[in-house]
Amino acid sequence: MLTTFVMGALCLELLACASRHERNAATLPHPTPSPIALSRPPALDMSHRALVATASLEPSAATGEFEAIAFVDDTHLVVQAEHGFLSYDLRAPKLEEHPFPSELVPSDDGRPNVSMSERGGRAILAVPQGAELWDLVTMRKLATLPFPKTESRSLDMSRDGAFASTLGCSAPVAPAVRGKCHVDVFSGKTGQRMGSFPVRAEMGVEGDDVGVGDTLVSPDGRYVAVEKNWHSFSLFRAVYETATGKERLFDPDIVNMQSGARVLDFVAPDTLLLSRHDGAKRVDLVTGRTTAKLVVPLPGPSSAPTALMTSHVRLPGSSRVAAVLGNGPTVFVWDGTENRMVNTFRLANKVAPCLANCRLVPLDATHVSLVGTSRPVALDSATGAIDIGTGEAAEEAAAVVDASTGTLLGTVEHHASSCLLRTAARVVPLSATFCGDGSPSIAARGAFLAGHTAKGLAVFDLVRSTNVFETRQAPAPAASGH
């Protein structure tokens, strides 16, 4: 039976909004943009193009579970499902289903080997012939990209859709002997290859390890960062020049098993911001030299979770890194441009220790939310103020970025009994669909938020304070038994 929820006005009082993979846990985080005030884009005339609450946008069970979500323009939403893309025209309203190629090659964990840009309307899919570059506005294949069939393959689409990158690694040639890895970079507009080169042996596959890692292309396409993952650990990270394949940085490192433990951002032309389990540094990629560095003395052996800087975020539009040390916790804010410690927030006597590792999520350019403590905590890096709330602490949180401007709107927080959009200025209650099963998965454009669970989707209008629609996917038909 189809279950459809259509919600009316929520009658919220919205105040003016002052305002960042990551990306998910297994990938390198992309640069987090600067904050702006939340408002409807001027080009969107709601008197003629108003979204309507509807119960008609219900995908078939054949599409499978939802994987990712993105806006391609003001009123068109694309969902990457298990077996295809779902294109929603929220103004019509209209839903179209676009199945993946039948020969789609799954990733190592069996899930669809597909990467979709958060904005820019592009996606890359792994197929036996290589990788297909898709335009998500027209839902057409633009090009087939070379992508050799190897023991392990990963692919990535840049956040703005400007670049696609692939990483393929061959099988080990003998026990404990690594296979070889190769990176290719393509234009997200035309599919033209911009770079092709091998990466150092430490990035290769060895033994039962097929976690080859991920790639991140700099905003101007000049550099490619490659990270080697082994189970939940990040082992090595290197940066290469796209056109020549010349290595500009190699940074061997082992951090904790928590996702998102480090930050790598291209913060300016030829400049990289890199955080580690014991600090952070700013690197000049032309010379490969570290121009600024933070080293935090750890209170115990690196194997102890309380002795690691377990969550790192870049403050939007800056060279500042906020990092939390242990479960105590202590939060540091360091400025890579000025090479100085901006703040040290000691919270050991103010909140109970985190049950697991504490996590940081940016609210805007100066405010950071601390997740995992016993109470809600917001830190102001501009003034050094600590705001400890009395309500229910968030269990998980995710930053929300406007796809039309690339600016940070705030965070969506999952609480035991609620789901909230939080900015530095206000809190907006949302449907539980936006928080999924505990890990928020959100897309935003202009005044609209879209969130999804594995089988559900909701869209909320922040200006009209209304849930546009909320729907759940039809269950798969039961076997006939004949």
Image (cartoon, rainbow, N blue to C red):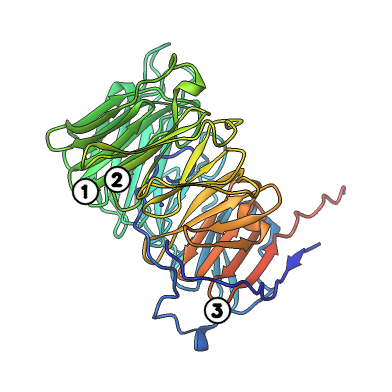
> How far is the residue under mark 3 from the one under mark 1?
38 Å
Q: Nearer the viewer, residue 278 or 299?
A: 299
Q: Residue at x 38, y 53 (%)?
A: 159
Residue 217: which disc? 2
Mark 3: amino acid: Arg
* Residue position marked by numbered label 1 in the rendering: 268
Q: Position of residue 428 (x, y in %)?
A: 58, 63
Q: Are marks 3 and 1 in contact (CB under 8 Å)?
A: no
Which residue is situated farthest in the top direction here? 175
Q: Residue at x 63, y 55 (%)?
A: 419
Q: Position of residue 334 (x, y in %)?
A: 31, 38
Secondary element at tag 2: strand
**Vertical placement of residue 234 versus 241, above or below:** above
Mark 2: amino acid: Val
Q: Are marks 3 and 2 in contact (CB under 8 Å)?
A: no
**Vertical placement of residue 186 versus 251, above or below:** below
Q: Is residue 246 visible?
A: yes
> How far is the residue under mark 2 from the one under mark 1?
13 Å
> How far is the residue under mark 3 from the one under mark 2?
34 Å
Residue 227: which disc? none
* Residue position marked by numbered label 3 in the rendering: 91
**Vertical placement of residue 144 versus 329, above or below:** below
Secondary element at tag 1: strand
Residue 99 horizontal side relative to residue 432, left or right: left
